[in-house]
Amino acid sequence: MAHTNQEIPRDQWEHYLAGITERIRHERVRVESISLESISLETGDQEIARSLPLVEISLERKGSDLGAVQIIAGHGDDEITHRVLEPERITAELDADSGALECLEIAERGSGKLLVFFERAPDADAPTVRA
């Protein structure tokens, strides 16, 4: 399957992330963190969440986490919240044919990146989320 990467301009982050929450809420996601240390040591990704329903992905607009990207996935006791405190770049990996969002990469200044994979059944119609 061919992919295309689309960097989301910083001034569109809030709108783009809100669109993901609106269109893809409750879809299952896998969240992985890749630190700069794990890249240099080749120790691999740290899985934060596996196959949990997306609750929200958003840009913090106030308070001490101003500018941070927050992702909430799961439900009840299985809910996780993860914040990328100093996001530097957001890149969407899209299916080249359908335009479906497959992965969101959030690069954090000096720390590595967070990967959010959108898990869909192979025959499901995948919503598109473009900037």
Image (tube, rainbow, N blue to C red):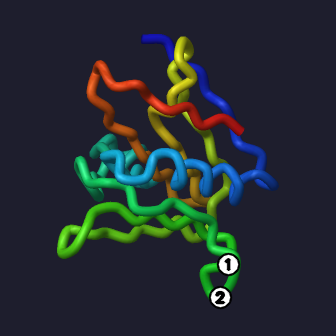
Query: Which label belongs to residue 66?
Result: 1
Residue at the (20%, 68%) spot, across then down: 78
Q: Is residue 14 above or below residue 61?
A: above
Query: What's the amino acid at mark 2?
Result: Gly
Query: Which label belongs to residue 63?
Result: 2
Query: Label 1: few (<14), some or many (≥20) within 10 Å?
Result: few
Give the SS element for disc 2: loop
Q: Is residue 107 above or below residue 64?
A: above
State how far apart marks 1 and 2 are (Cα). 6 Å
Give the SS element for disc 1: loop
Q: In which quarter of the image is the C terminus?
A: top right
Q: Is residue 7 left or right of residue 28?
A: right
Q: Is residue 125 left or right of residue 64?
A: left
**Residue at the left extreme, as displayed:** 77
Q: Is residue 104 left or right of residue 54?
A: right
Callout 1 touching callout 2 (CB < 8 Å): yes
Residue at the (28%, 45%) spot, across then down: 43
Q: Is residue 82 left or right of residue 99?
A: left
Q: In which quarter of the image is the N terminus?
A: top left
Query: What's the amino acid at mark 1?
Result: Leu
List x then y, in percent, for residue 96: 56, 15
List x then y, in percent, for residue 31: 35, 51
Q: In this view, does 43 lie above or below 87?
A: above
Query: Label 2: few (<14), some or many (≥20) within 10 Å?
Result: few
